[in-house]
Image (cartoon, rainbow, N blue to C red):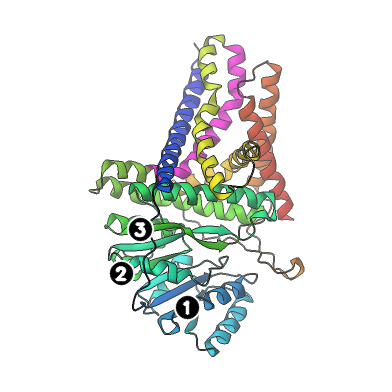
Amino acid sequence: MPVLPLLLVVLYGLCLLFILGFSVGQWQLTRLARRAYAAPPAPAPPAPAAWPRVTVQLPLFNEQNVVERVIDATAALDYPSALLHIQVLDDSTDATVAMAAARVAHHAARGLRISHVHRTNREGFKAGALRDGLLETDGEYVAIFDADFVPEADFLRRTVPYFLQDARIGVVQTRWGHLNENESLLTRLQAFGLDAHFLIEQVGRTFAGFFINFNGTGGVWRRACIDDAGGWHTDTLTEDLDLSYRAQLRGWRFVYRPEIVAPAELPAVMDALKSQQFRWTKGAAETAHKHLGPVWRSAQPLGVKLQASFHLLNSSVYVVIMLMALLSVPLVFVRAQFREYKVVFQLASVFLVGFTPLIYYYYSAWRLAHPDKPLWRYPGFFLLFLSVSMGLALHNARAVILGWLGRRTPFVRTPKAGTAPVARRRRYRTGGMGPLVALEGLLAAYFAFGLGAGIYFDDFGLLPFHSLLTLGFAAIFYYSVRHAR
């Protein structure tokens, strides 16, 4: 029996087992979230007799399209002005600096305590800006909004009271809303994925007492929690996930409230989406490398440790998908030539079984987010989302591997388009037609070849997989080329 075909079969089988384990984990969180929604809702805490001091931090870097919008939105927050301090943490190198300064001056003239903190070195990127800003404010609580967020006026009045219930609550995180969900198919697909995280994953983890994460924006920190956990570190691209784990390992509790929504803008072009995905997946791998050891050495219950490991390793699924995809094409030829593997391939061909729990996971979120949409719309949209997610596997797998290897890369922020007319928007680009985009195009052809080979050999077991891969990589390649122009 040749060794190479056997090795391919074994590796492919291990990938399938990993995918199945990942999917079962999402299924468990879905069950927990459904139990949380079935329970009677907890009443909102009452307003305090005396409100505490709050600092609102707005980290910016070259955000001409949205800088005025986010400053005006936070300036309109309904909170006692004597207790509110807004910090515009501006690392910009373009006209954003002048635009931010003008809006800050406008609101300061109205009596608002608002500061424009402009750094010229960008040391530590976002984490460095947040860290340096804390040195210049006296807020007991710190709300953070990225430049693409537009918080509602009552945001602080709805979140701050939770801290006053328990001195060990370190974070109150809210759900992200989507200002431009219906702008394009790309934004609808992103909303579909994010809704699953915010409506299912965060809810399920909170209900079971597992670790959750501050999502980088749209939430509030207790200043004492940040200090106790060691402050903002700059050694990962997901400073939010890193600080979340350090805080929870020190016994701080996190509150997640999905009914409080912080509206935000979704990336509308492929290079912006890719920059966001790279930061999230690489940063998650860096944080896993940093915290898996401390998690398992902690005194946390075994269930919390297992779920924390699953949480930290979530982004690694892209590496497995990419490996499984590359193996799938030669496996078509192995099956055609080595009939002794027939039973093994019959098992492997039902790879979609590994994705079945994901159908339940995403459907639950989709139904919560869109209760009025007809059921028949879900299957096709889910398959399209799955396909595009697979198409991002090369890009995201590279990010994960770089994270695990400890390779340092700069913090590339996600460009925002804003709501101004197209002619007035500044087009920020994060990259052009690089080798990776060309490779995505070649991989689309590679999987199309696998699809054709399966049809030629009358082997339709991997046809669904190759169809999704071909469509996904072709779509990512097309939009990458289109948006690079």
* Earlier sequence position, callout 3 versus callout 1: 1
Q: Quadrant of residue 94?
A: bottom right
Determine which of the numbered discs, if any, sits on residue 254 in the image. 3
Q: For this view, does 260 lie left or right of residue 263? A: left
Q: Main secondary structure of the magenta part?
A: helix
Rendered-image quadrant of the C terminus: bottom right
Q: Which residue occupies 39% across, 69% down?
A: 160
Q: What residue occupies the far right of the structure in this picture?
A: 423
* Earlier sequence position, callout 2 versus callout 1: 1
Q: Which residues are magenta?
A: 310-338
Name above or below for residue 204 compared with residue 110: above
Amino acid type, residue under disc 3 in the picture: Phe
Amino acid type, residue under disc 2 in the picture: Ala
Question: Which of pointers 3 and 1 indicates the residue nearer the eye?
Answer: 3
Percent across and percent down for residue 392 are: 59, 43
**Residue 319 highlighted magenta (yes or no):** yes
Secondary structure under badge 2?
A: helix
Secondary structure under badge 3?
A: strand
Determine which of the numbered discs, if any, sits on residue 224 in the image. 2
Percent across and percent down for residue 220 are: 41, 66
Secondary structure under badge 1?
A: strand
Which residue is identified by label 1? 86
Residue closer to the observer: 161 or 89: 161
Name above or below for residue 259 compared with residue 478: below
Disc 3 crowd, CA 10 A, few/some/many (<14, 14-19, 20+):
many
Disc 1 crowd, CA 10 A, few/some/many (<14, 14-19, 20+):
many
Residue 402 visible at all? no
Percent across and percent down for residue 38 are: 42, 45
* Earlier sequence position, callout 2 versus callout 3: 2
